[in-house]
Image (spheres, helix red, strand yellow):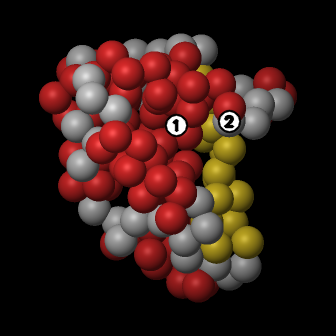
Amino acid sequence: MATEAFEDIADTFAFLDDWEDRYRHVIELGRAMPAMDAAFHVPATKVNGCASQVWILPQIEGQGPQARFDFQGDSDALIVRGLIAVLHALYSGLTVNEVMRVDAPAELARLGLNEHLSAQRSNGVRAMVERIRDTAAEAAAA
């Protein structure tokens, strides 16, 4: 269950021949992502478990299981900003119920990220996914 935006990324990754091209594409996705206001770089939005500084600001529209999920994100590392952009493409616009059903490891594996990210970066992605899922679960229960 992937969004159209994520499918576009997956198609681009399938077209790119080597990991260096894919890596550059992830960085470009991060550069293209709208900036998050530095006022939101606070402990409440910080994601623990990431080697880099990472902030995720959830934006829930509506209430209950059908509420729509979106978020802003930022990092002090370009590659991580790109990974945030990939996660944004994976989750943005889904209902909070749909967010909880996304198999993020399987979807991200389609991009080959598992084999090419350091252990610290992989842990950071897991921490971001966990934050997104926890936020969606809280919103669904509200």
On screen, residue 57 above or below 90: above
> In what element is the residue under mark 1?
helix
The N terminus - image quarter = bottom left
> In what element is the residue under mark 2?
loop
73 left or right, relative to 128: right
Asked where in the image residue 67 lies, by quadrant, the reply is: bottom right
Q: Nearer the viewer, residue 115 or 126?
A: 115
* 1 and 2 marks in contact (CB < 8 Å): yes
Mark number, residue 33: 2
The C terminus - image quarter = bottom right
On screen, residue 42 above or below 20: below
Asked if residue 42 can be seen in this view, the reply is: no
Identified at 71% across, 27% down, the residue is 41
How many C-alpha atoms fall within 10 Å of the one at disc 2: few (<14), some, or many (≥20)? some
How many C-alpha atoms fall within 10 Å of the one at disc 1: few (<14), some, or many (≥20)? many
Of the two numbered discs 1 and 2 in the rendering, the one whose residue sits closer to the viewer: 2
68 left or right, relative to 113: right
Mark number, residue 12: none
Identified at 53% across, 14% down, the residue is 77
Identified at 72% across, 79% down, the residue is 62
Identified at 33% across, 23% down, the residue is 121
Q: Position of residue 73 (x, y in %)?
A: 63, 37
Q: Position of residue 98 (x, y in %)?
A: 44, 75
39 left or right, relative to 69: right
Asked if residue 64 can be seen in this view, the reply is: yes
Q: Nearer the viewer, residue 5 or 133?
A: 5
- Amino acid type at mark 2: Met
Q: Name the residue tied to disc 1.
A: 84
Q: Position of residue 130 (x, y in %)?
A: 38, 49
Precedes in sequence: disc 1 or disc 2: 2
- State the residue lying farthest toward the left: 115
